[in-house]
Amino acid sequence: MVLGIWSFRNLYHQRRTITDGSSHDLKENKRSCRDKKDCKVVFSQEELRKRLTPLQYHVTQEKGTESAFEGEYTYHKAQGIYKCVVCGTPLFKSETKFDSNSGWPSFYDVISPDAITLTDDFSYGMHRIEISCSQCGAHLGHIFDDGPRPTGKRYCTNSASLSFKPAEKSNAGEGSSSTSPAPTGKAEL
């Protein structure tokens, strides 16, 4: 019977969006699209399965986790913007990326507090805070309070939930040169 009560608690807390901003020192999101009802960007499951790799789909739509130290952006150092792989919402600047030695890309701040939704996650018998895209509800990873200054936060993010837009290089005096980055095998909708 204890297991049944614990399972109910996990289910209840996984669906509850954080409403006590003071306990997490983060801005409360006014609207959550975690349940896919209030999302600004919606794709059919059929389209998502066509456009995303199996790993991207598993991570973003089924709250999966990629293997530690194997993600495309774990050791990535290029300058630019990390975006949601599902809808393209800008999430993180490369200037806020740091090596956390956790095995996943880590950032100490988001581009905008409105870019992500925070949700209590009591899976696996522990309490964590899930981060998901506020526009499409894609699972990104989790946030922890062990990051560097100035925020003290660590947004631990799956590479499979991200796409990357390199910073534009200025070629002063060389005319306009427009080149596309090499394909990475990641789909962005």
Image (cartoon, helix red, strand yellow):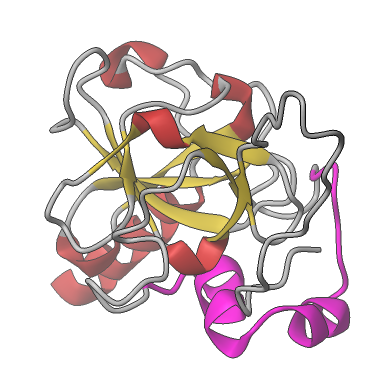
The image shows residue 149 at horizontal and vertical percentages of: 19, 16
The image shows residue 154 at horizontal and vertical percentages of: 26, 36
Q: Residue at x 22, y 48 (%)?
A: 127
Q: Quadrant of the C terminus?
A: bottom right
Q: Residue at x 30, y 69 (%)?
A: 7
Asked if residue 31 lies in the magenta stretch, the reply is no
Residue toward you, 39 or 84: 84
The image shows residue 174 at horizontal and vertical percentages of: 78, 34
The image shows residue 155 at horizontal and vertical percentages of: 34, 40
In which quarter of the view is residue 11 placed? Answer: bottom left
Q: Residue at x 16, y 25 (%)?
A: 148
Q: Which residues are magenta?
A: 39-65
Q: Quadrant of the N terminus?
A: bottom left
Q: Residue at x 44, y 37 (%)?
A: 94
Asked if residue 58 lies in the magenta stretch, the reply is yes
Q: Is residue 1 visible?
A: no
88 above or below 25? Answer: below
Residue toward you, 66 or 183: 183
Residue toward you, 164 or 140: 164
